[in-house]
Image (tube, coloured by chain):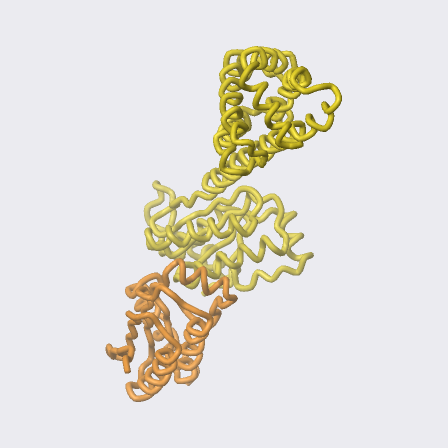
Chain colours: A orange, B yellow
Amino acid sequence: MERIPILKMGEYLLVTIQVDMHDRLAMSLQDDLTSRIVSARAKGVLIDISALEMVDSFIGRMFGDIAAMSRVLDAETVVVGMRPAVAITLVELGLSLPGVRTALNIERGMELLRGLISARGRDDAGSA
Amino acid sequence: MATDSIASLNEVLQKDEATLLQSWVDNQVNASAFRPDRTSRQDLMDQSRRFLALMRDAVRGGEQDIMSPAWTGVRQMLDDLSVSRAQQGFSPSETATFIFSLKEPLFDRLQRVIGQTEAVARLWPINLLLDRLGLYTTEVFQRGREKVIIRQQQELMELSTPVVTLWDGVLALPLIGTLDSARTQVVMENLLQRIVESGAAIAIIDITGVPTVDTVTAQHLLKTVAAARLMGADCIISGIRPQIAQTIVHLGVELGTVVTKATLADAFAIALKRVGLVVQKASTAPRRRDDEGADARAAAERGEG
């Protein structure tokens, strides 16, 4: 069965979706990613969907779910590279994904992730 | 009976075409619907001659239904005539007069061919036939007009949704006119496409030119903002007039976390700040301390860290 690779880069996990998502693939990505976040003790997850051309409500919800799950596991998620057509579809489906952080490309996404994590580091240090 | 009528019509068209054409064109020129500014006697003559020739061909087979293949030539001729008249700005009745003015001279001649006794019965089918042709021109005319309207709507839509680059990484979308769903779609697509092309991080949607904001318009604006955010660009809505601010609150429209500013200038200032740029006077080279204090206070008021 095909799987979506999850790459570890330091304290970040990088997921690049290069194929069209179907429901089973989405479910296995959720499983794989959550267990990888725990095993790699990742602080940030970057999901690149620039190659994704089609979404349905299930896949759209999955992004929201993944973001929420990683937040529970103490990792920030940034979705990058969404295509205009995909963005319009999601909005028309009523999924504006309020809990998901987004960026235009990987570079910006990485920047945002770093900022988020360092800000959180400061907060933790402050409260301790 | 109907076949008899067609036969008589055929006979008149074969024999009497020249004089029929003459009096028909006279009729058209003398009609109140004649537009000397848009058409000439010569044009009418040509059109009428072509029509009679085509009609003669159509009638020869005895076919009465104007939608049948035998009448294709006539229909095409009327299509062209009606559409071109629609574009030239004729009215529907002026267009239909082309056919209806044929009645008088044609019936004159038919009456001579047909005996007095059965005149009414024989003329009736031909009358119907001409009515149908006349209505057909009106129909096609209408369609031609609608095409013009649709084209204009599209042009208007494309014209009125430009996306401009204010600065490297800052886009502006000045909206003018009512925001309906079709326009929202175009606006959204344009904006998102430009975000991808330019890699802009911030887009300012200026609604100074939007006359009214109701719940539907607000919904459309929020959709656009949400779509841009999904792609990783922040949106600021600017140009909210006092009246519109009041309407938004009275209608209970929830703008959520969307940043709103009263003027485009305010929005641009905050956009520049977010991309990490400062604007300062050319003469005062280093930043003064009290400026920084003012900026920090302004930022605190906006609820930013």
Q: Residue at x 35, y 79 (%)?
A: A25
Compare residues B83 and A61 and report the one nearer the observer. B83
Residue A96, x across and y down, in percent = 48, 66
Which quadrant is home to the N terminus of chain B? top right
Quadrant position of residue B93: top right
Left or right side of A77 for A99: right
Residue B213, x across and y down, in percent = 61, 50
Left or right side of A9 for B202: right
Quadrant position of residue A42: bottom left
Which quadrant is home to the C terminus of chain B? bottom left
Residue located farthest toward the right when viewing the structure as drawn: B117
Compare residues B99 and B9 and report the one nearer the observer. B9
Q: Is residue B228 visible?
A: yes
Q: Is residue B142 visible?
A: no
Residue B104, x across and y down, in percent = 67, 18
Residue B89, x across and y down, in percent = 56, 25
Left or right side of B149 for B199: left
Figure check: B23 above or below B246: above
Left or right side of A30 for B10: right
Quadrant position of residue B19: top right
Q: Residue at x 42, y 45 (%)?
A: B163
Compare residues B256 and A28 and report the one nearer the observer. A28
Figure check: B217 above or below A2: above
Q: Residue at x 67, y 57 (%)?
A: B251
Q: Give the number of marks.
A: 0
Q: Residue at x 35, y 61 (%)?
A: A104
